[in-house]
Image (cartoon, grey):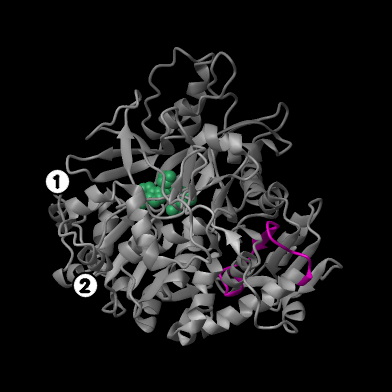
Amino acid sequence: MTNVEVLLGENRKFYPPKSLVENSNIKQWMDTHKITDLETLYKRSRDIEWFWGEVEKDLVEWYSPYGKILDDSNKPFYRWFTNAGYNIVHDALDRHMKTSIKDKIAYIFEMEDGRVTNITYSDLYKDVNKLANALKELGVGKGDRVAIYLPMIPALPTSMLACAKIGAVHSVVFSGFSAHALKDRIIDSGARTLITADGFWRKGKIINLKEQADEAVKGTGIENVIVYDWSHCDVPMRKRDTWCHDITTPQSTECETEIMDSSDPLFILYTSGTTGKPKGVEHVHGGYAVGVSQTLKWVFDLKPEDIWWCGADIGWITGHSYIVYAPLILGVTSVLYEGAPAYPEPNRIWEMIARHRVTVFYTSPTAIRMHMRFGDEWAKKDDMSSLRLLGSVGEPINPEAWMWYYINIGNSRCPIMDTWWQTETGCIIISPLPILPTKPGSAALPLPGFNAQVQDRDKNPVIDKGGDLVLTTPYPSMLCTLHNEPERYIEHYWDKSGMFICGDIARVDSEGYFWVQGRGDDVLNVSGHRIGNSEVESALVSHSYVSEAAVVGRPDDIKGESIAAFVVLKIGVEQSEGLKQELREHVAREIGKIARPEYLYFVNDLPKTRSGKIMRRVVRSAIITHDVGDLSTLANPEAVEEIEKALG
Ligand code: PRX
């Protein structure tokens, strides 16, 4: 038996250090509220209105008071902190200008080449105001959508905050997405302004972003493209393009913050679903601000002296919530890193933690597994003594990776917060707390103020059995709708009894701990990124040589899941290795490199039902368990042999 197996014995628990528990934010809150034990805390917080009404007082400042804490008169369109005058930028920036936080560092920004810039709250405030004024001058106003296509540079949070400040709704598109994916999102959001950059650095090379942006805006309603001069690469500027510095330099460093309703939209973030069309998840100013700042404060226990590093990309929800909005509301210092995680050496991340004295670090299981593969010696080079808490997000963390992270990075003294949540939830929902014992591989309990269940097919709650993960009560940071698709919002997420269906399969153990196993629907999770099977299939069949495609996930030691595509070519098209490569590249062009199929097989037929629907379940079973089960509903069982032959 290896050491890891010994440590992982059935239900092995790890207890947080006493000093952490005693000094934690949550413990302090419990003391103030005269709550002496965790059981009482969880019990009392089931009264969600009481709970959220209590915690918001320490987190946000409304311009005018709210009416109701929760208005559920129009389910499932819940409204929190109704009719309050509010703008999230007031809490993220404006409010700090009256305190000593003004001169504190908001972002320690490190470029890939190692250059570091310290950006204070006051620097950020001024930059945001200048851009906000420039946007106003371009005619952008309250409710207008602005698309943002930027890498991990300070311009990204600045642009988001500038939009929010004037009441515009930002729609950030991950800079790794292709021109085609950006175009779809621009059209769906109805954005007329795009903020982008000339290019950015990745593994020592400049990636030309403007080229993609130029391609994307063709045939959309974009009237203005604002371009950050970042990598100084050569880019053609057209009539609709403006260099950002040209429009911001003359602006005032003051800009009035637009007073919004707490339920007004703050941003749209597109995420993959079970159909080809991504869903525009919409979040609001008020409830979102309360949810993200509360969870950061309790789960990661952030204090004024902490140096926080969330290693996600701002293009995803983790970055929106825990690099931009929550840390700024709490007034903490964050690390922001432009480049690749293992560049130029595998220990880049650990070396940065040591150099910047990072105290709390949040990353993904894929990143942890990648570092495990580099070997322990790379993790042992640097001084990790500044760390006190660790986090994981985006996909299930296997107990071996958990233990490696715990021992090698946390020196067996930093509890790991395995946080479960989604783009839709806006903030962490199921997670350990620094005062709870952790179990490797389990995201522990729904946080106080949140309620979840695992249900069987008949919708009965089950213990110690796999089933559907559902959220049983609303919470402030939940999505308010899907952009332009309120019907889809209702149909996709809500069951008849008013429960929110997450799309995940999970199990609750006898102590109430949740073990999330992965998606239960046709959505892949590759390196913690959500990609719809049908999105990749649509990309494949958009190639003129492809007739049909079935895409499934294949377990992967590092990425959790990798993409496997089975492709039927049009009659007369010859199969070749060259064509395989071309099709993989075609998907990368259509969606982005993250969606490029790792495996691509040619087959003559795909398993189908009698009504002609491709049965991904059968394809998936063939690749994962090699046991396709009952084929009686198949119209063409011989197609299964095709798949098995292709797999060899
Ligand atoms: O399947 C779950 C998985 O990631 C999905 C949400 O993806 P996305 O909206 O892109 O947001 C990712 C970052 C919050 C979930 O439905 N997931 C996320 N965190 C975990 C997880 N699966 C297991 N354990 C987690 N801690």
Asked if residue 151 lies in the magenta stretch, the reply is: yes
Look at the image and give the residue range highlighted in magenta. Answer: 137-156
The residue shown at (85%, 68%) is 238
Nearest the camera: 451 or 269?
Answer: 451
* Residue 490 at least partly seen: yes
Q: In this view, does 162 lie to the left or right of 367?
A: right
Q: Is mark 2 on a helix, strand or loop?
A: loop
Q: Distance between the residues labelled 2 and 1?
A: 30 Å
Q: In this view, does 323 lie to the left or right of 374?
A: right
Asked if residue 510 lies in the magenta stretch, the reply is: no
Which image quarter: residue 578? top right
Mark with earlier residue (2, 1): 1
Label 1 residue near ligand 1, CB within 8 Å: no
Circle 2 or circle 1, nearest the eye: 2
Which residue appears farthest toward the right when viewing the image?
239
Which residue is the site of mark 1?
Answer: 10
